[in-house]
Image: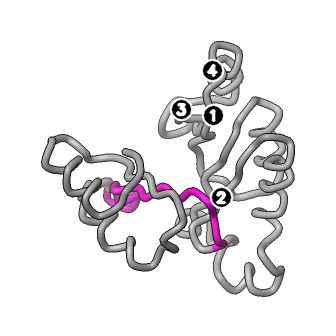
């Protein structure tokens, strides 16, 4: 279950995440722009099972920083939660699950083709989730045919 926690633009909160955790046992994704490792601790405390690490929204998560810090401080911190039954992932860091947002966060346009464009770069044993813009049976069939696991 995806729970928006970004307050300024989307009106979400960590309280929403904690409320969702109290109401269900499903894995919970903290849907927010993670730009600081402190937010990982917040996510874990509020009951998140996973977080989004988005390099485009947080330049601090760029490839250069990742290369300098091994698999990356953010991913290591997120994965510490994974050892306690939580999961953490980042697109370029060998994640077990990758969610492809079909919404361009610069202009908010939505194109399901974004998932198809990225599939070849994703390891075949990675679970792929297509997110946003899926609004027809044809979309579902095409995603399934290309090996996308969830939508």
**Image side of residue 5 versus residue 133, left or right:** right
- The image's colouring method is one colour
- Which residue position is annotated with label 4? 20
The 10 Å Cα crowd at callout 1, few under 14, some 14 to 19, many 20 or more, is some
Where residue 70 sits in the image (x, y, percent)?
Answer: 82, 81
Question: How far apart in space, not on screen, are marks 2 and 4 (Cα)?
Answer: 20 Å
> Tag 3, which secondary structure?
loop
**Image side of residue 25 versus residue 146, left or right:** right
Check the image and report above or below for 93 versus 33: below
**Image side of residue 134 versus residue 124, left or right:** left
> Which comes sooner in the sequence, label 2 or label 4?
4
Where residue 50 sits in the image (x, y, percent)?
Answer: 67, 45
Q: Do the residues labelled 3 and 1 touch (CB within 8 Å)?
A: yes
Check the image and report above or below for 57 versus 72: above
Considering the whole magenta stretch, tell me its main secondary structure.
Answer: loop
- Which residue position is annotated with label 3? 1
Q: Do the residues labelled 2 and 4 touch (CB within 8 Å)?
A: no
> Which comes sooner in the sequence, label 3 or label 2?
3
Residue at position x 71%, y 48% in the image: 87
Residue 27 — which label?
Answer: 1
> Which comes sooner in the sequence, label 1 or label 4?
4
> Which comes sooner in the sequence, label 3 or label 1?
3
Question: How far apart in space, not on screen, are marks 1 and 4 (Cα)?
Answer: 10 Å
Whether the magenta-drawn stretch holds residue 25 is answered as no
- Which residue position is annotated with label 2? 89
Question: How far apart in space, not on screen, are marks 3 and 4 (Cα)?
Answer: 9 Å
Q: Give the range drawn in magenta.
A: 93-107
Q: Are marks 3 and 4 in contact (CB under 8 Å)?
A: yes
Residue at position x 76%, y 30% in the image: 46
């Amino acid at each position: 279950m995806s729970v928006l926690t970004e307050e300024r633009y989307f009106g979400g909160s960590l309280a929403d995440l904690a409320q969702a955790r109290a109401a269900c046992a499903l894995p919970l994704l903290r849907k927010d722009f993670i730009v600081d490792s402190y937010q990982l601790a917040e996510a874990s405390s509020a009951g998140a099972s996973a977080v989004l690490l988005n390099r485009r929204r947080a330049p601090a998560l760029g490839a250069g920083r990742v290369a300098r810090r091994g698999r990356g401080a953010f991913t290591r911190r997120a994965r510490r939660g994974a050892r306690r039954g939580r999961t953490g992932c980042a697109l370029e860091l060998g994640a077990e699950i990758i969610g492809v947002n079909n919404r361009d966060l610069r202009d908010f346009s939505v194109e399901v083709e974004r998932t198809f464009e990225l599939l070849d770069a994703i390891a075949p044993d990675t679970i792929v989730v297509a997110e946003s813009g899926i609004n027809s049976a044809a979309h579902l069939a095409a995603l399934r045919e290309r090996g996308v696991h969830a939508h």
